[in-house]
Image (tube, grey):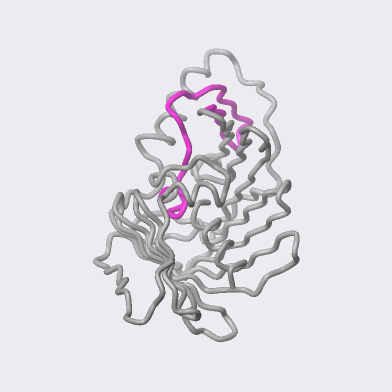
Amino acid sequence: MKTILGSIIIIVTLVSCSASRKIRTNASSISPIHDTLALENKDTLKTEAARLLYSENGIPFQTFSAKVKVEYQDENGKQPDVNAFVRMKKDQAIWISVAATFLNIEGFRVLITPDSVVVMNKLEKTIEEYPFSYLQSRISIPVSFNDVQELVAGRAAMTGDSIGLVKSDGNYLEISLSDKNIDNIFYYTLPRLLLAKQSARISQPGKNYTANMLYEDYSKTDAGYFSTSRDVRIPEKQQHIFLSFKQIEFNKELSLPFNRPDGYTVK
């Protein structure tokens, strides 16, 4: 169960469907773009990139909820699938309830705030409390709480404040950024401008690795288009995570129940 919990913590940092046909981004086939556009297009591309990453970064939201089927594999092989029910209040908290798919019994409840991570193990009746830096240590990526909620909502995260190269081949817009110890490349589809892929290279003392996140199967929700299939791979850690979203809702009233029952051991 600790392995499953660890995978859920990783997924969060990285994480209702319309009946209409889903939009494919063909993210797995994207490769670096050879810049062949005329020089006079550069300023236009940078303006568009800034709009996508900052002023119109995905679906605007105050609350978010979804059911997520999680498939996880690492150096120990494929782990049991789990269902994660996620609720989020922007800039306040992310609430997660985790159940094994074959039992459908809640095993863990997690509450993440800008300052802390609290894990309730309902199987062992324990509660563990950590500072937010615990989440950063689990994934070895210097993410902020804002980055976490952006990733969960399917928006560009870890964007920094300085755009580097911007390229286009007519099918995708490629945006390169560097921020602290992370080099990011984002790919958006053309002409819809849907986030299709994020490739991050993380460089830290003794730790150098990559994370590739693919965004597929966009469905129309009341708030806009949302990627219902996510594929996350971290080759150096032999980690592969696949997420399937449904029952998606934005900007609805919701609660984040996290009562601490009597008889639980606080670690």
Give the x, y percent position of residue 98.
48, 73
Snapshot quadrant of residue 259 = bottom left
**In the rendered view, does 257 fall on the left or right side of 178?**
left
Residue bounds of the magenta highlight: 149-178
Give the x, y percent position of residue 202.
61, 36
One can see residue 213 in this view? yes
In this figure, what is the number of numbered marks?
0
Identify the image quadrant of the N terminus.
Answer: bottom right
Give the x, y percent position of residue 171.
61, 38
Snapshot quadrant of residue 38 = top right
Identify the image quadrant of the C terminus.
Answer: bottom left
- Measured along the vertical axis of the image, is residue 215 above or below residue 202? below
- Measured along the vertical axis of the image, is residue 208 above or below residue 112? above
**In the rendered view, does 4 fall on the left or right side of 219?**
right
Is 92 inside the magenta-drawn segment?
Answer: no
Is 150 inside the magenta-drawn segment?
Answer: yes
- Identify which residue, 67 or 93, lies in the foreground: 93
**Residue occupying image coordinates x 37% and y 54%:** 116
**Residue occupying image coordinates x 56% and y 37%:** 186
Q: Residue reaching furthest left?
A: 253
**Residue occupying image coordinates x 32% and y 79%:** 261
Snapshot quadrant of residue 264 = bottom left
Give the x, y percent position of residue 109.
42, 71
One can see residue 248 in this view? no
Q: Residue reaching furthest top?
A: 39
- Measured along the vertical axis of the image, is residue 162 above or below residue 24? above
**In the rendered view, does 207 fall on the left or right side of 164?**
right
